[in-house]
Amino acid sequence: MRHYHDWEPFCVDPLKPELGQEVTLRLRTPARAGFLILERYGEVERRPMKAVPGGLEISLPLHTSPLRYCFFLPEEKAYLAADGLRGPMPRYDKFFHLLAQPTAPDWAVGAVFYQIFPDRFRNGNPHNDPQSGEWVYMGRPIVRKEWDEPVSYGPGEGPIQHYGGDLEGILEKLDYLQALGIEALYLNPILPSGSNHRYDASDYHNVDPHLGGNEAFEKLVEALHRRGMKLVLDGVFNHIGHTHPDFQKALQDPTAPEAGQFTFYADGSYAAFYGVKTLPKLDYANPLTTERWIDGYHAPLRHWLRKGADGWRLDVAHQIGEGGTDRRNAEILRLIKRNSVEENPEAFVFGELFFDTLPTLRAHTLDGSMHYAGFANPVMEWLSGQNVYGWEVAVSSQAVWDTLWDHYTALPLQLRQSMYTLISSHDIPRALWRLRGDVERFKLALGILFTFPGAPGIYYGDEIGLDQTNPYHDWNGDPMCRGTFPWDERRWNQEVLAWVKTLIRLKKSVPALRRGGLQPLQVSEKLLAYKRRYEDEEVWVYAALEPTPVLLPPSRKPADRRDPGGRYLGFGAGGISLVAVKNPALGGAFLRSRPNFGAGESSPAEGSVKTSNERSQACCDVWCQVYTGFMRWLGVLVLLVGLVSCQSATPKACVVIRAVSLEAGFKVNDTDSPNVTIQKGDCIEFVNADPSLSHTVQTKPFSNPPEEIPAHNLPYEPYSFRKVFNIAGEYEYICSLTTNNVVHARTMYGKITVR
């Protein structure tokens, strides 16, 4: 993409403007003229932008939040909206959306989270364990289970099984979590309750004694903050437990002030979360509800932030409202965010918005949400062939990319890197189970999780390959996704653990992965590729469902074999040595399989990486089938997920077919002859050298269908595409140039003879 606008210092200055403050908007573009198209007070204004080094800019006051705008580029004869170039003016929902403060705190941008279901992570104090029959929940006595005993999932069994996990257990394992690279914990509810999930609390101002009580909480907060780690609690403000004193008073006396906090119907029933009567829904039409739960000095929202919590994950945030509905939802969420920031200016407040997040987040409410609809659901559907309900679905690579891109580009700019991305949680089946134990595909899912924009969340145990015990044909999330963490390291998948540690290290250390914007690279039947970009740094990510050829731009000039830091960042299983250069116009990559080459080595063996000017049978061609490999080279990090094995040796010779310009057309090895004769093992390289052109090439066999190249688009930037011919035959090729959206402005036909 030649034109780029996202949440980075060049494009938005300041990054976090206050309402009414002047903000400078810039577009990275080679264009030297353009307009800002601004929606203001119901009208659309056209404001000229001025040329500056690197693009176009304009300054204006942030008159509202969100500020909605797009760009018009005369040389493209098109509008640039959030999702790309468009001929007609896009709808407002396709505009860029910029929010005023307050937005997500800096610490949460791209932060690595770890979600813990407290009863199942670690038993640090057996003396506070619940005992079988200690109380009755929903008509059944609770059950104390041994740590390694499987979870049962018969009717009503889920919430009555207690394993004894507690806050002391979390405290004991902070060294483990810190070594993993975790920056923030998100805990499921910790308040007193009759269930193991504690979403039906009976007391909102104290920690459940079976989790260690208030003392354990204070110790945990102190230890986390001493390590520079954060703590986010689960805020259940849509409903409470039916045993809570306020609800009991309402049941006993309809005239009591507490009764107004709930929605009672004429038949004596009341509004409850999904109709579950143990979860009566709070009614925020009553001022007492607002005061008691989220606004007053003693409101639990404020109480736990004063006690040291660093933020809230709001349970079913989209349902909070008045009269048993979601009425005034956005207004209530804004109040929750405002009050949280009053108690802790660095508070991070995100919601469980399971479905479409955009109506809520564009209303300037929260700092982000759990990214189910725009990340977890499409990614896992693509990888598993089943949706979150267990229904079989057919999701192509193009469909998953379209969904990811649609949700990403629709988000307000400041929230794109603070969305809580995930592949597993306490509400959905574990990712490894959904993938039927396929570790390689699970690692692919993890790779996408940590390279996609957002704040990735690991569900406890995913990092060591924790699975579910129910058979694959028996679809179940809750409670089977809530098994206990196995602390016997012999049961851990060390390969997955090492991969997760490496991904976390990259997420934390590479600005383009932590804060960078998103751009498309390539989509094919089995391949998803995208680019992360932040200022002058780029990361290219290639994710393949099965062994897939990945083409990286071939080298144009020799380069030093080490990155500026003189080190390799690491490799996954199989090990790949990879060279990639910052600008595709200046060079590219060769891959070579090297067994057992790990992240610990400072550099590969001499000669393991070759540029295109160093022909060697020891090195594979750029067409390689690759698996979890990555390297940093001159500012670009390239990550690949697939299967290691080289397809062919380095070509003995290469013929270059170059798109020179619209006027000059194409050159074949710097001649005008369109026909080429090569030997088996030689290659043809199609090169686009003019950034104002887009180049499409298609190669087909005349006969014997030995090899065929489907249509391959070379984007509006210097780029190249290489094909090695290993089977004799005659092929025809068609090259077309596109400029200013005029298709086939210049075309060349030719013949390739392979002997």
Image (tube, rainbow, N blue to C red):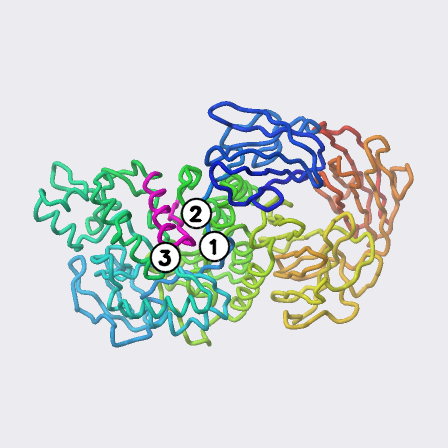
Of labels 3 and 2, earlier in sequence is 2
The residue pinned by badge 3 equals 426
Q: Secondary structure at mark 3?
A: loop
Q: Is residue 450 above or below residue 665?
A: below
- Left/right placement of residue 750 relative to residue 224 reads right
Q: Is residue 449 above or below residue 162?
A: above
The residue pinned by badge 2 equals 367
User: Which three-letter amino acid code belongs to the residue tagged 2?
Assistant: Asp
Say which mark, if any, is on residue 463: none
Say which mark, if any, is on residue 108: 1
In magenta, the rendered stretch is: 331-354
Badge 3, how many Cα within 10 Å: few under 14, some, many 20+?
many
Q: Residue 77: image x %, image y %?
A: 67, 26
Of labels 1 and 2, earlier in sequence is 1
Q: In the image shown, does 166 or 366 lie closer to the viewer?
A: 366
- Left/right placement of residue 694 relative to residue 658 reads left
Q: In the image shown, does 40 or 417 lie closer to the viewer?
A: 40
Q: Residue 704: image x %, image y %?
A: 77, 44
**Label 3, label 2: how far apart the Cα atoms are:** 21 Å
Marks 1 & 2, CB-CB < 8 Å contact: yes
